[in-house]
Amino acid sequence: PARPSPACSPCRGRGRSARGGPTRPGPCSGSAPCSERRSGRTRGRTARPGRPPPLPPPSPGTRGGTDGADPVREQQRAGPAASGRRLPAALGSVAAVPDGAVAAAGRRPPPAADALRLREVLSRLSLLREDVSEASTLVNTVVPHLVQAIRDKDSCFSSIERQSAGSYYERVKISEPNEFDIMLVMPVTRIQLDESDDTGAYYYVSFKRSPKEKGWLKFLEEDGKLSAFKMLQALREIIKQEVKNIKGMEVTVARKKAGSPAITLQIKKPPLEISVDIILTLEAQQSWPCSTQAGLKIEQWLGTKKRRDFRFRSIYLVAKQNKREKVLRGNTWRLSFSHIEKDMIKNHGNSKTCCESNGPKCCRKGCLKLLKFLLEQLKRKHPKELEKFCSYHVKTAFLHSCVMWPNDTDWHLGNLDHSFQQCLGFFVDCLQKSQLTHFFIPQYNLLSQEDKARHHFLSRKISYELNNGFPVFHENY
Ligand SMILES: [Zn+2]
Protein backbone atom coordinates (compact mmCIF):
# COMPACT_ATOMS: atom_id res chain seq x y z
CA PRO A 1 0.00 0.00 0.00
CA ALA A 2 1.77 3.07 -1.24
CA ARG A 3 1.26 5.83 1.25
CA PRO A 4 2.68 9.25 0.72
CA SER A 5 6.07 9.55 2.30
CA PRO A 6 6.31 11.15 5.71
CA ALA A 7 7.77 14.12 3.94
CA CYS A 8 4.54 14.66 2.10
CA SER A 9 2.94 17.91 3.10
CA PRO A 10 -0.65 17.83 4.29
CA CYS A 11 -1.86 19.67 1.26
CA ARG A 12 -0.90 16.78 -0.96
CA GLY A 13 -2.52 14.13 1.13
CA ARG A 14 -5.79 12.72 -0.07
CA GLY A 15 -7.55 14.15 2.91
CA ARG A 16 -6.87 17.62 1.81
CA SER A 17 -9.03 17.30 -1.24
CA ALA A 18 -11.68 15.52 0.77
CA ARG A 19 -11.96 18.47 3.02
CA GLY A 20 -14.62 20.20 1.05
CA GLY A 21 -16.60 17.01 0.74
CA PRO A 22 -19.74 15.91 2.48
CA THR A 23 -17.90 14.55 5.46
CA ARG A 24 -16.77 17.98 6.37
CA PRO A 25 -17.63 18.39 10.00
CA GLY A 26 -20.11 20.93 11.07
CA PRO A 27 -19.92 22.81 14.34
CA CYS A 28 -18.58 21.34 17.52
CA SER A 29 -19.37 21.73 21.23
CA GLY A 30 -17.45 21.35 24.40
CA SER A 31 -19.01 18.22 25.71
CA ALA A 32 -16.22 17.32 28.01
CA PRO A 33 -16.67 18.77 31.40
CA CYS A 34 -14.72 21.90 30.93
CA SER A 35 -13.01 23.03 34.03
CA GLU A 36 -12.67 26.67 34.61
CA ARG A 37 -9.18 27.89 34.85
CA ARG A 38 -7.76 26.59 38.01
CA SER A 39 -6.80 29.39 40.20
CA GLY A 40 -4.91 28.92 43.37
CA ARG A 41 -3.80 25.56 42.16
CA THR A 42 -0.46 24.38 43.26
CA ARG A 43 1.35 23.01 40.36
CA GLY A 44 2.47 19.50 40.97
CA ARG A 45 5.42 19.93 38.73
CA THR A 46 7.38 21.47 41.50
CA ALA A 47 7.15 18.25 43.38
CA ARG A 48 9.09 16.47 40.71
CA PRO A 49 12.16 18.39 39.94
CA GLY A 50 13.53 15.74 37.66
CA ARG A 51 10.98 16.20 34.91
CA PRO A 52 11.04 15.80 32.01
CA PRO A 53 12.61 12.38 32.10
CA PRO A 54 15.45 11.73 29.75
CA LEU A 55 14.51 10.77 26.28
CA PRO A 56 14.91 7.13 25.48
CA PRO A 57 17.46 6.33 22.83
CA PRO A 58 16.13 6.57 19.30
CA SER A 59 14.67 3.25 18.28
CA PRO A 60 12.94 3.55 14.96
CA GLY A 61 11.59 0.06 14.95
CA THR A 62 9.81 0.13 18.27
CA ARG A 63 6.70 1.92 19.33
CA GLY A 64 7.78 2.40 22.85
CA GLY A 65 4.42 1.14 23.99
CA THR A 66 2.90 4.55 23.57
CA ASP A 67 0.37 3.88 20.94
CA GLY A 68 -1.69 1.38 22.80
CA ALA A 69 -1.93 3.45 25.90
CA ASP A 70 -5.07 5.21 26.90
CA PRO A 71 -5.83 8.56 25.44
CA VAL A 72 -4.65 11.49 27.39
CA ARG A 73 -6.67 13.68 29.66
CA GLU A 74 -9.92 14.60 28.07
CA GLN A 75 -10.89 17.48 30.19
CA GLN A 76 -10.56 20.95 28.99
CA ARG A 77 -7.93 22.95 30.63
CA ALA A 78 -8.42 26.55 29.91
CA GLY A 79 -6.08 27.71 32.58
CA PRO A 80 -2.83 29.38 31.92
CA ALA A 81 0.14 27.17 31.79
CA ALA A 82 2.35 26.52 34.69
CA SER A 83 5.08 28.96 35.08
CA GLY A 84 8.49 27.55 35.34
CA ARG A 85 12.06 27.98 34.48
CA ARG A 86 12.74 27.81 30.86
CA LEU A 87 15.24 25.14 30.12
CA PRO A 88 17.29 24.83 27.01
CA ALA A 89 15.76 22.92 24.19
CA ALA A 90 16.22 19.25 24.75
CA LEU A 91 16.61 18.13 21.20
CA GLY A 92 18.69 20.73 19.50
CA SER A 93 17.48 23.65 17.53
CA VAL A 94 15.96 23.73 14.12
CA ALA A 95 16.37 26.42 11.53
CA ALA A 96 13.42 28.72 11.88
CA VAL A 97 10.94 29.33 9.13
CA PRO A 98 8.64 32.26 9.70
CA ASP A 99 5.00 31.81 10.56
CA GLY A 100 2.85 31.08 7.58
CA ALA A 101 -0.17 29.25 6.38
CA VAL A 102 0.15 25.52 6.62
CA ALA A 103 -1.04 24.91 3.14
CA ALA A 104 1.24 27.50 1.66
CA ALA A 105 3.01 26.22 -1.37
CA GLY A 106 6.71 25.86 -1.01
CA ARG A 107 6.55 24.83 2.59
CA ARG A 108 9.78 23.20 3.52
CA PRO A 109 9.22 19.47 3.49
CA PRO A 110 9.93 18.12 6.96
CA PRO A 111 13.26 16.38 7.27
CA ALA A 112 13.08 12.62 7.22
CA ALA A 113 14.20 12.64 10.81
CA ASP A 114 10.93 14.25 11.85
CA ALA A 115 9.05 10.99 11.95
CA LEU A 116 11.67 9.62 14.26
CA ARG A 117 11.45 12.68 16.43
CA LEU A 118 7.69 12.42 16.76
CA ARG A 119 8.07 8.84 17.94
CA GLU A 120 10.58 10.02 20.47
CA VAL A 121 8.13 12.63 21.69
CA LEU A 122 5.49 9.94 22.10
CA SER A 123 7.88 7.75 24.04
CA ARG A 124 8.70 10.61 26.31
CA LEU A 125 5.01 11.26 26.91
CA SER A 126 4.51 7.65 27.75
CA LEU A 127 7.25 7.86 30.35
CA LEU A 128 5.56 10.90 31.84
CA ARG A 129 2.45 8.84 32.15
CA GLU A 130 4.17 6.16 34.16
CA ASP A 131 5.06 8.91 36.49
CA VAL A 132 1.41 9.39 37.26
CA SER A 133 0.83 6.15 39.08
CA GLU A 134 2.04 7.40 42.42
CA ALA A 135 -0.18 10.44 42.29
CA SER A 136 -3.16 8.41 41.15
CA THR A 137 -2.74 6.00 44.04
CA LEU A 138 -3.16 8.93 46.35
CA VAL A 139 -6.23 10.16 44.48
CA ASN A 140 -7.69 6.69 44.61
CA THR A 141 -7.32 6.67 48.37
CA VAL A 142 -9.03 9.99 48.85
CA VAL A 143 -11.88 9.87 46.35
CA PRO A 144 -13.64 6.66 47.45
CA HIS A 145 -13.54 7.97 51.00
CA LEU A 146 -15.26 11.18 49.92
CA VAL A 147 -17.78 9.39 47.72
CA GLN A 148 -18.83 7.24 50.66
CA ALA A 149 -19.24 10.26 52.89
CA ILE A 150 -21.30 12.07 50.25
CA ARG A 151 -23.62 9.07 49.90
CA ASP A 152 -24.07 8.75 53.64
CA LYS A 153 -24.63 12.37 54.47
CA ASP A 154 -27.30 13.35 51.98
CA SER A 155 -29.91 10.89 50.79
CA CYS A 156 -30.22 12.78 47.49
CA PHE A 157 -26.66 11.76 46.76
CA SER A 158 -27.08 8.16 47.89
CA SER A 159 -26.50 6.75 44.41
CA ILE A 160 -23.69 9.05 43.37
CA GLU A 161 -20.78 7.25 41.78
CA ARG A 162 -17.38 8.05 40.56
CA GLN A 163 -17.25 7.44 36.86
CA SER A 164 -15.01 4.73 35.57
CA ALA A 165 -13.01 4.28 38.71
CA GLY A 166 -9.54 3.06 38.00
CA SER A 167 -9.22 4.55 34.58
CA TYR A 168 -7.37 7.50 35.98
CA TYR A 169 -4.63 7.26 33.43
CA GLU A 170 -6.97 8.20 30.71
CA ARG A 171 -8.01 11.45 32.22
CA VAL A 172 -4.59 12.65 33.00
CA LYS A 173 -3.23 15.51 31.06
CA ILE A 174 -0.02 14.44 29.44
CA SER A 175 2.32 16.97 30.83
CA GLU A 176 0.61 17.68 34.14
CA PRO A 177 0.56 14.31 35.82
CA ASN A 178 -0.61 15.77 39.09
CA GLU A 179 -3.88 17.23 37.92
CA PHE A 180 -6.95 15.04 37.94
CA ASP A 181 -10.56 15.39 37.04
CA ILE A 182 -13.08 13.18 38.72
CA MET A 183 -16.62 12.93 37.48
CA LEU A 184 -19.17 12.24 40.19
CA VAL A 185 -22.23 10.89 38.46
CA MET A 186 -25.76 11.23 39.78
CA PRO A 187 -28.39 9.05 38.16
CA VAL A 188 -31.61 11.00 37.60
CA THR A 189 -34.88 9.92 36.05
CA ARG A 190 -37.45 11.58 33.84
CA ILE A 191 -35.83 14.91 33.44
CA GLN A 192 -36.90 17.56 31.06
CA LEU A 193 -34.34 19.46 29.09
CA ASP A 194 -34.96 22.98 27.87
CA GLU A 195 -32.34 24.61 25.71
CA SER A 196 -30.78 27.58 27.40
CA ASP A 197 -29.40 29.04 24.17
CA ASP A 198 -28.95 28.22 20.51
CA THR A 199 -25.83 26.06 20.92
CA GLY A 200 -27.89 22.95 21.55
CA ALA A 201 -25.37 22.03 24.23
CA TYR A 202 -26.59 23.96 27.27
CA TYR A 203 -29.83 23.10 29.02
CA TYR A 204 -32.00 23.81 31.96
CA VAL A 205 -32.95 20.64 33.76
CA SER A 206 -36.22 20.08 35.54
CA PHE A 207 -38.07 16.99 36.69
CA LYS A 208 -41.09 15.82 34.73
CA ARG A 209 -42.48 14.36 37.92
CA SER A 210 -41.54 15.50 41.34
CA PRO A 211 -38.79 13.13 42.53
CA LYS A 212 -39.69 10.64 45.25
CA GLU A 213 -36.81 11.81 47.34
CA LYS A 214 -38.12 15.08 48.72
CA GLY A 215 -34.62 16.22 49.58
CA TRP A 216 -34.25 17.17 45.94
CA LEU A 217 -36.55 20.13 46.47
CA LYS A 218 -33.73 22.02 48.09
CA PHE A 219 -31.82 21.92 44.82
CA LEU A 220 -34.66 23.37 42.77
CA GLU A 221 -35.19 27.00 41.99
CA GLU A 222 -38.59 28.65 42.24
CA ASP A 223 -39.32 27.87 38.62
CA GLY A 224 -38.44 24.21 39.13
CA LYS A 225 -35.04 24.30 37.45
CA LEU A 226 -32.41 22.07 38.97
CA SER A 227 -29.64 24.27 40.26
CA ALA A 228 -26.14 22.99 39.64
CA PHE A 229 -24.94 25.71 41.92
CA LYS A 230 -27.02 24.51 44.87
CA MET A 231 -26.01 20.91 44.34
CA LEU A 232 -22.35 21.79 44.20
CA GLN A 233 -22.70 23.94 47.25
CA ALA A 234 -24.10 20.97 49.18
CA LEU A 235 -21.37 18.68 47.89
CA ARG A 236 -18.76 21.20 48.79
CA GLU A 237 -19.93 21.42 52.38
CA ILE A 238 -19.87 17.64 52.80
CA ILE A 239 -16.45 17.39 51.27
CA LYS A 240 -15.07 20.22 53.37
CA GLN A 241 -16.16 18.41 56.51
CA GLU A 242 -14.98 15.04 55.38
CA VAL A 243 -11.46 15.95 54.30
CA LYS A 244 -10.71 16.63 57.94
CA ASN A 245 -11.10 12.91 58.60
CA ILE A 246 -8.54 11.83 56.05
CA LYS A 247 -5.36 10.72 57.68
CA GLY A 248 -1.85 10.44 56.38
CA MET A 249 -1.98 13.39 54.01
CA GLU A 250 -3.21 16.93 53.85
CA VAL A 251 -6.41 17.35 51.89
CA THR A 252 -8.00 20.76 51.51
CA VAL A 253 -10.76 22.23 49.42
CA ALA A 254 -9.55 25.15 47.37
CA ARG A 255 -11.24 28.47 47.88
CA LYS A 256 -14.24 29.11 45.75
CA LYS A 257 -13.80 31.49 42.90
CA ALA A 258 -16.38 34.16 42.24
CA GLY A 259 -19.04 32.87 39.91
CA SER A 260 -17.69 29.36 39.80
CA PRO A 261 -18.99 26.66 42.08
CA ALA A 262 -16.33 24.18 40.93
CA ILE A 263 -14.82 22.05 43.66
CA THR A 264 -11.08 21.61 43.63
CA LEU A 265 -9.30 19.41 46.11
CA GLN A 266 -5.68 19.84 46.96
CA ILE A 267 -3.85 16.82 48.23
CA LYS A 268 -0.43 17.16 49.75
CA LYS A 269 1.80 14.34 50.75
CA PRO A 270 5.36 15.46 50.28
CA PRO A 271 6.84 15.44 47.78
CA LEU A 272 3.54 15.05 45.98
CA GLU A 273 1.08 17.86 45.42
CA ILE A 274 -2.01 16.97 43.52
CA SER A 275 -5.11 18.83 42.55
CA VAL A 276 -8.39 17.18 41.77
CA ASP A 277 -11.33 18.89 40.11
CA ILE A 278 -14.66 17.37 41.01
CA ILE A 279 -17.16 17.51 38.20
CA LEU A 280 -20.78 17.02 39.08
CA THR A 281 -22.56 15.06 36.38
CA LEU A 282 -26.16 13.96 35.86
CA GLU A 283 -26.87 10.71 34.08
CA ALA A 284 -30.26 10.12 32.52
CA GLN A 285 -31.37 7.10 30.56
CA GLN A 286 -33.41 8.84 27.95
CA SER A 287 -33.11 9.75 24.33
CA TRP A 288 -30.59 12.29 23.23
CA PRO A 289 -31.84 15.83 22.54
CA CYS A 290 -32.71 16.82 18.96
CA SER A 291 -29.64 18.99 18.67
CA THR A 292 -27.61 15.77 18.40
CA GLN A 293 -29.71 14.28 15.62
CA ALA A 294 -27.34 15.05 12.78
CA GLY A 295 -24.12 14.76 14.76
CA LEU A 296 -21.80 11.83 15.37
CA LYS A 297 -21.30 11.16 11.67
CA ILE A 298 -19.36 7.98 12.20
CA GLU A 299 -21.15 5.74 9.72
CA GLN A 300 -18.18 5.46 7.38
CA TRP A 301 -15.68 5.20 10.16
CA LEU A 302 -17.18 3.02 12.90
CA GLY A 303 -20.39 1.96 11.20
CA THR A 304 -24.12 2.59 11.44
CA LYS A 305 -24.64 -0.05 14.09
CA LYS A 306 -22.08 1.56 16.35
CA ARG A 307 -23.73 4.92 15.90
CA ARG A 308 -27.11 3.48 16.84
CA ASP A 309 -25.63 1.78 19.89
CA PHE A 310 -24.01 4.98 21.07
CA ARG A 311 -27.21 6.90 20.71
CA PHE A 312 -28.95 4.39 22.97
CA ARG A 313 -26.58 5.18 25.80
CA SER A 314 -27.45 7.50 28.65
CA ILE A 315 -27.07 11.21 28.35
CA TYR A 316 -24.68 12.98 30.65
CA LEU A 317 -24.96 16.59 31.74
CA VAL A 318 -22.21 18.37 33.57
CA ALA A 319 -22.72 21.34 35.84
CA LYS A 320 -21.44 24.09 33.66
CA GLN A 321 -22.25 27.72 33.63
CA ASN A 322 -23.22 28.99 30.23
CA LYS A 323 -21.15 32.14 29.93
CA ARG A 324 -23.37 33.53 27.23
CA GLU A 325 -26.17 34.04 29.72
CA LYS A 326 -26.64 37.58 30.87
CA VAL A 327 -27.26 36.66 34.47
CA LEU A 328 -25.08 33.85 35.75
CA ARG A 329 -27.31 31.82 37.99
CA GLY A 330 -25.52 28.50 38.01
CA ASN A 331 -28.48 26.56 36.75
CA THR A 332 -27.30 25.50 33.31
CA TRP A 333 -26.04 22.05 32.43
CA ARG A 334 -24.01 21.07 29.43
CA LEU A 335 -24.28 17.84 27.50
CA SER A 336 -21.20 15.71 27.90
CA PHE A 337 -20.22 12.91 25.58
CA SER A 338 -16.96 12.03 27.23
CA HIS A 339 -18.13 8.44 27.75
CA ILE A 340 -18.75 8.04 24.02
CA GLU A 341 -15.57 9.84 23.07
CA LYS A 342 -13.60 7.56 25.30
CA ASP A 343 -15.17 4.52 23.68
CA MET A 344 -14.51 5.80 20.16
CA ILE A 345 -10.91 6.58 20.94
CA LYS A 346 -10.38 3.18 22.48
CA ASN A 347 -12.18 1.21 19.79
CA HIS A 348 -11.20 3.38 16.91
CA GLY A 349 -10.67 0.93 14.07
CA ASN A 350 -12.61 0.81 10.85
CA SER A 351 -11.84 -2.89 10.88
CA LYS A 352 -12.34 -4.57 14.21
CA THR A 353 -8.76 -5.72 14.57
CA CYS A 354 -7.09 -2.32 14.53
CA CYS A 355 -4.55 -2.11 17.37
CA GLU A 356 -5.76 -5.35 18.92
CA SER A 357 -3.02 -7.58 20.21
CA ASN A 358 -2.37 -9.33 16.93
CA GLY A 359 -4.00 -6.87 14.56
CA PRO A 360 -2.23 -4.17 12.61
CA LYS A 361 -1.36 -1.07 14.58
CA CYS A 362 -2.36 2.43 13.66
CA CYS A 363 -1.26 5.88 14.76
CA ARG A 364 -4.63 7.43 15.67
CA LYS A 365 -3.95 7.58 19.39
CA GLY A 366 -0.43 8.75 18.76
CA CYS A 367 -1.79 11.61 16.69
CA LEU A 368 -4.27 12.60 19.37
CA LYS A 369 -1.56 12.62 22.01
CA LEU A 370 0.69 14.74 19.86
CA LEU A 371 -2.13 17.16 19.12
CA LYS A 372 -2.87 17.57 22.78
CA PHE A 373 0.75 17.91 23.70
CA LEU A 374 1.30 20.49 21.00
CA LEU A 375 -1.54 22.62 22.32
CA GLU A 376 -0.35 22.21 25.91
CA GLN A 377 3.14 23.30 24.98
CA LEU A 378 1.93 26.27 22.96
CA LYS A 379 -0.32 27.27 25.85
CA ARG A 380 2.68 27.23 28.12
CA LYS A 381 4.54 29.43 25.75
CA HIS A 382 1.64 31.83 25.13
CA PRO A 383 -0.62 31.49 28.16
CA LYS A 384 -2.46 34.74 27.66
CA GLU A 385 -3.09 34.51 23.94
CA LEU A 386 -4.12 30.86 24.01
CA GLU A 387 -6.08 30.98 27.23
CA LYS A 388 -9.36 30.12 25.54
CA PHE A 389 -8.15 27.00 23.80
CA CYS A 390 -8.43 23.67 25.45
CA SER A 391 -7.80 20.05 24.68
CA TYR A 392 -11.42 19.62 23.67
CA HIS A 393 -10.74 21.70 20.59
CA VAL A 394 -7.99 19.40 19.38
CA LYS A 395 -9.88 16.32 20.40
CA THR A 396 -12.82 17.47 18.32
CA ALA A 397 -10.58 18.19 15.35
CA PHE A 398 -9.12 14.73 15.82
CA LEU A 399 -12.53 13.05 15.79
CA HIS A 400 -13.45 14.90 12.61
CA SER A 401 -10.16 13.74 11.13
CA CYS A 402 -11.09 10.16 11.95
CA VAL A 403 -14.32 10.67 10.01
CA MET A 404 -12.58 12.30 7.09
CA TRP A 405 -10.01 9.55 6.84
CA PRO A 406 -12.05 6.56 8.01
CA ASN A 407 -9.85 3.70 6.87
CA ASP A 408 -7.27 2.04 9.05
CA THR A 409 -4.83 2.23 6.16
CA ASP A 410 -5.12 6.02 6.37
CA TRP A 411 -3.50 5.81 9.77
CA HIS A 412 -0.73 3.36 9.17
CA LEU A 413 1.64 3.44 12.10
CA GLY A 414 4.60 4.04 9.83
CA ASN A 415 2.98 7.26 8.63
CA LEU A 416 2.58 8.91 12.00
CA ASP A 417 4.22 12.00 10.65
CA HIS A 418 1.96 12.35 7.70
CA SER A 419 -1.21 11.56 9.65
CA PHE A 420 -0.29 14.04 12.35
CA GLN A 421 0.29 16.71 9.75
CA GLN A 422 -3.07 15.96 8.17
CA CYS A 423 -4.86 16.33 11.49
CA LEU A 424 -3.04 19.56 12.13
CA GLY A 425 -3.75 20.78 8.64
CA PHE A 426 -7.43 20.23 9.26
CA PHE A 427 -7.29 21.98 12.62
CA VAL A 428 -5.47 24.97 11.16
CA ASP A 429 -8.10 25.13 8.48
CA CYS A 430 -10.81 25.26 11.15
CA LEU A 431 -8.92 27.99 12.98
CA GLN A 432 -8.55 30.07 9.86
CA LYS A 433 -12.28 29.83 9.22
CA SER A 434 -13.21 30.11 12.90
CA GLN A 435 -15.40 27.09 12.40
CA LEU A 436 -15.00 23.91 14.41
CA THR A 437 -18.21 21.97 14.62
CA HIS A 438 -19.02 20.14 17.82
CA PHE A 439 -18.72 16.45 17.00
CA PHE A 440 -22.11 15.58 18.45
CA ILE A 441 -24.00 18.85 18.05
CA PRO A 442 -23.64 20.14 14.50
CA GLN A 443 -25.18 23.54 15.18
CA TYR A 444 -22.58 24.34 17.82
CA ASN A 445 -19.40 26.03 16.65
CA LEU A 446 -16.62 25.71 19.19
CA LEU A 447 -14.74 28.61 17.64
CA SER A 448 -16.83 31.70 18.10
CA GLN A 449 -16.46 34.28 15.38
CA GLU A 450 -15.73 36.96 17.96
CA ASP A 451 -12.42 35.32 18.73
CA LYS A 452 -11.09 35.35 15.18
CA ALA A 453 -7.87 37.07 16.16
CA ARG A 454 -7.05 34.37 18.69
CA HIS A 455 -7.81 31.66 16.17
CA HIS A 456 -5.45 33.23 13.69
CA PHE A 457 -2.81 33.54 16.35
CA LEU A 458 -2.96 29.83 17.14
CA SER A 459 -3.09 28.97 13.48
CA ARG A 460 0.12 30.94 12.89
CA LYS A 461 1.83 29.27 15.83
CA ILE A 462 0.88 25.81 14.65
CA SER A 463 1.98 26.59 11.12
CA TYR A 464 5.32 27.71 12.45
CA GLU A 465 5.71 24.44 14.32
CA LEU A 466 4.71 22.44 11.27
CA ASN A 467 7.20 24.27 9.13
CA ASN A 468 10.05 23.94 11.55
CA GLY A 469 9.88 20.37 12.75
CA PHE A 470 7.95 21.12 15.97
CA PRO A 471 10.65 22.77 18.05
CA VAL A 472 8.12 23.39 20.84
CA PHE A 473 8.00 19.66 21.57
CA HIS A 474 11.55 19.91 22.77
CA GLU A 475 11.23 23.02 24.87
CA ASN A 476 10.48 23.22 28.55
CA TYR A 477 8.22 25.89 29.96
ZN1 LIG B 1 -5.66 1.39 15.65
Image: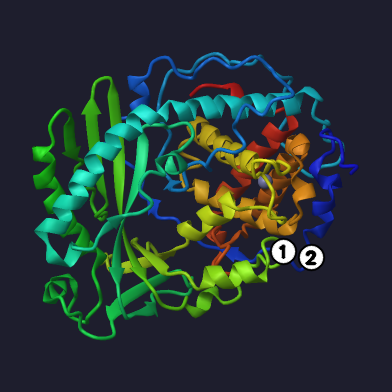
Q: Is 164 on the left-hand or right-hand side of 311?
A: left
Residue projecting furthest to the right: 2
Residue 22, visible in the rendered structure: yes
- Report the colour scheme: rainbow
Q: Are marks 1 and 2 in contact (CB under 8 Å)?
A: yes
* Secondary structure beneath label 2: loop
Q: Where is residue 153? Give x, y as percent.
A: 10, 57
Q: Where is residue 66? Give x, y as percent.
A: 59, 32
Tell me the quarter of the picture where residue 135 sits: top left
Q: Using the image, tell me which numbered label, if any, was put on residue 24.
A: 1
Where does the N terminus fall, quadrant-wise? Answer: top right
Is 79 situated above or below 34? above
Total numbered circles: 2
Q: Is 455 on the left-hand or right-hand side of 193?
A: right
Q: Nearer the viewer, residue 276 or 213?
A: 213
Classify mark 2: residues with Cα within 10 Å, few (<14), some (14-19) or many (20+).
Answer: few
Tell me the quarter of the picture where residue 202 sits: bottom left
For the point 53% across and 55% down, the residue is 343
User: Which residue is label 2 attached to?
Assistant: 21
Q: Where is residue 362? Give x, y as percent.
A: 71, 42
Classify mark 1: residues with Cα within 10 Å, few (<14), some (14-19) or many (20+).
Answer: some
For the point 50% across and 17% down, the residue is 53
Residue 326, visible in the rendered structure: no
Q: Amino acid at mark 1?
A: Arg
Is 285 situated above or below 162? below
Tell me the quarter of the picture where residue 463 sits: top right
Q: Amino acid at mark 2?
A: Gly
Residue projecting furthest to the front: 358
Is 420 situated above or below 426? above
Q: Nearer the viewer, residue 94 or 277?
A: 277
For the point 69% across and 41% down, the residue is 358
Q: Where is residue 48? Give x, y as percent.
A: 37, 19
